Amino acid sequence: MFSKLPIKRLLILMVILAMVGLAIVTRWADTIVEDVRQEVVENAEKNLRVPLYDSIVYTPIWLEYLQKQNFDTPVIGMFGASTVYGTTVKDAWNTPAGIIQVHLEDKRVLNLGLSGARLAETYAILSSIIDKIDYVVYEINYGILSVTDNDPSVSIYPTLMSKLDQNIPRQWLNEFNHKDKESVPSKVHDILTTGLLNHWTLYHDRDVINYRFFKTRTTTEYVRREVKKVRDAKQGIAATYIPPYRSFDKLKENQQEEIVKHFTSLYAWDEPFDKSKSFGLFLMEKTLDLLDEHKKKAVFYTAPLDKQMIDEHHMLDWNDYYIVMGAYQELIESRNYPFIEFNKEESNLIPHEYYHDASHLIDDGSTIFGEILYERLRSFGITDTQ
């Protein structure tokens, strides 16, 4: 009976229908992503940074747009983690990038900071855009150095690195036994994703589509979040909401406790810092190699910390800080790049009342620091006006 059915024709028809369906879905995805792209570009052009609600999803879109631009003025790129991006700064024009841009009519300033970015992500962002940048201003955040070394994973945002075609080569991990080589794509996987799948919207922009409809980067993340909500509700666990733009002193006691707990953990080192075993220091050397190769003018500086808060709550050992940061300063200056240490004085560079936590400034504090940074960069010829 079944032998009389036109199996071959049915199979061909099923394949054709599948291809047509895939084409329709892809076209739909193209439309969604194009709408998001326009929103991101308009926001970034107006506010100097991608939208606040999830910068990790939108940063690759902004970078891909910038890669296609021909700038008619010199470009200053500001790189680093959340303190560069301004996670606790409500008005993007109050970030250091915004303050510096106001002073400079003859240069374009790009805020290319990324919340949570470790040195691997910052390297990838810099590498992807370096041909469009004339000056590099790179902020080193102490908390990022510890997690870069502590965590076995190389990257916290592997999708971003893949989309930018900037995956770290596995051989870079050969001297670092504590690093998980499986956290870095193999050459075959890299070729398959960047060479083939990244040309397909449903793959390349899957995080954009997920975030558009589920406000999460992956469906797995969405399911985990919803399951956690149900579980916490059953156990009577209430999430602690911390207003991002409010100073530490104006937060509730339980909110302050959460901040102190988080940053104390962030600043801890699993093993005593060793220059010869530091993956972060290795990545910084690769960053300097990149700058040398492209002959870029660059300045490095440290994110100003709230020493008052840190000392009151015993959040870190300053001897550790100066050993670690001293190693980075020694390396950077050995390659003839300036290094500005904003935490060398006993008292705060920025008053305590302008901090949201140990390293993030609110709008007023960020404005003060932006002015300080602008003046310091003038001595290196980066923020001089023509």
Image: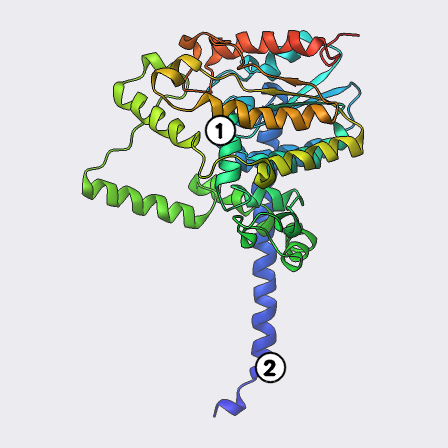
Question: Is label 2 in a helix, a strand or a loop?
Answer: helix
Residue indicated by mark 2: 8
Of marks 1 and 2, the one in the foreground: 1
Instruction: Report the residue at 58% width, 27% height from top.
Output: 113
> Is residue 225 in sight in this rendering?
yes
Q: Amino acid at mark 1?
A: Gly
Instruction: Report the residue at 43% width, 20% height from top.
Output: 358
Q: Quadrant of the C terminus?
A: top right
Q: Is residue 131 above or below residue 95?
A: below
Instruction: Report the residue at 42% width, 32% height from top.
Output: 268
Find the distance from the CA under tag 1 to the CA under tag 2. Answer: 61 Å
> Is residue 102 in sight in this rendering?
no
Which of marks 2 and 1 precedes in the sequence?
2
Q: Amino acid at mark 2?
A: Lys
Residue 67, given in percent of the width and then of the height, sits at: 72, 34
Residue indicated by mark 1: 143
